[in-house]
Amino acid sequence: MSLSFFSGLPFFLCLTAVLALAFLLGILEKPLRWYSLAATLFFVAAIFWQTPIQFFYLVSFCALELILLKGYLSLRKLYGRRERCYCGALLVSLLPLLLSKCGEVSTVSFFSFLGVSYLTFKSLQMVIEIYDGVITEFSAVEFVGFLLFFPSLSSGPIDRSRRFHQDWSKTCSRSEYLQLCGDGLWKLLLGLVYKLVLASAFYRAVEFFGESSAWYAIPGYAYAYGFYMFFDFAGYSLMAVGASYFLGVRTPDNFRAPFISRDIKEFWDRWHITLSHWFRDFLFSRFIMKCSRKKWFKTRLQRACAGFLVNMTVMGMWHGLTPSYLIYGIYHGLLLAAAEGFQKKSKFYKKYKNTRWYQVLSWFLTLQLVMFGFLIFSGKFWELICG
């Protein structure tokens, strides 16, 4: 029997059985942490054992990150906030992801396994917060449960270790757990509709416009691909969040009606929220602080614009080292920088930003820019400019 995360009847039959037993334990007010860990190890073994090399890389990754974090925590206690130790820990934590990404543009591939990007970000977050002094202790068993938590292993959402710890160490009352399961069931069912019905419909539209030579084919493709991306990924994320609720873990939501955004900054506060907020907290904000200390730019606006460009370019590289992903990242970096400059400097914006006509116009323009971004992301734009 072949299993893959949130896809195919075998997986959903196993998931139903696992969540049913979790529900029974939950309403009996039993702690779910050990059951959650056992369920995670079951799904990881069942899915990754089908590809032994990925299983080997996954186990090696977990061992490497655990040794690194325990080692760096000891060094942090002994020597304090030493930059060299910190940078070394960051580099070692990033190394598997860097090796995996290099495999995309070469014939040699190491550490290429399902979910490596998301797992790396979880580990990096802990390295950074150990450096900050926010994390002073952690359990190895809980770390494995956090890192490999099966609902969000392959494609997120990206949880934070301290938030996960609150749920891991808590036992819900019956009434609280029933409310949590009710919300989780709704998310699971909605996610199924998103992924199996709506995403499938828009994928057929993508195929139709991709094969068409009519004048409307390109904008049609951009819109179809954008909505397909949303319903496919948001559907997966909803199912991951819903399943985690049954295990007593309130995994954060990943999407919040992104296509009603009235500017590009609001869009990134609604789209792939856990990823965009991760970059905001651990790259953008720290880049801005570094710029301020080193006086690299004269004004706060210049720092912010540079931060957006760096932040989104790195995000594009995180998706993949292909021209389409790099252009996509730079494109959104430029949009965010332009939006920041316009909102900070434009008297027109300050005068009309709360009027209805301006908000409608701003929403319409934002939607077009977002859909053009999806055209870039899809690779279709690169095909067009390369002939």
Image (cartoon, rainbow, N blue to C red):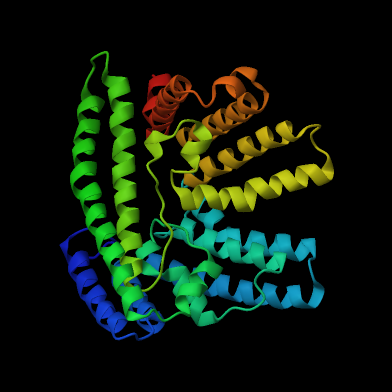
Q: Position of residue 121 (x, y in %)?
A: 53, 58
On-image quarter of the N terminus: bottom left
Nearer the observer, 355 or 177:
355
Q: Is residue 188 above or below residue 167?
A: above
Q: Position of residue 301 (x, y in %)?
A: 71, 32
Is residue 222 in sight in this rendering? yes
Asked whether, in this view, residue 314 is left or right of residue 13, the answer is right
Q: Is residue 111 something one can see in this rendering?
A: no
Tell whether 275 sits left or right of 249: right
Residue at 42% in and 59% down: 115
In percent of the image, x 80 and y 65: which residue is there? 82
Query: Which quadrant would the C terminus be assigned to in this image?
Result: top left
Q: Is residue 95 left or right of residue 272?
A: right
Point 33% across, 68% down: residue = 180
Residue nearer the viewer, 54 or 267 = 267
Q: Identify the residue at the far top of this view.
A: 215
Give percent across and percent down for residue 247: 34, 73
Seen at 39% across and 32% down, the residue is 374
Query: How many labels, in total?
Result: 0
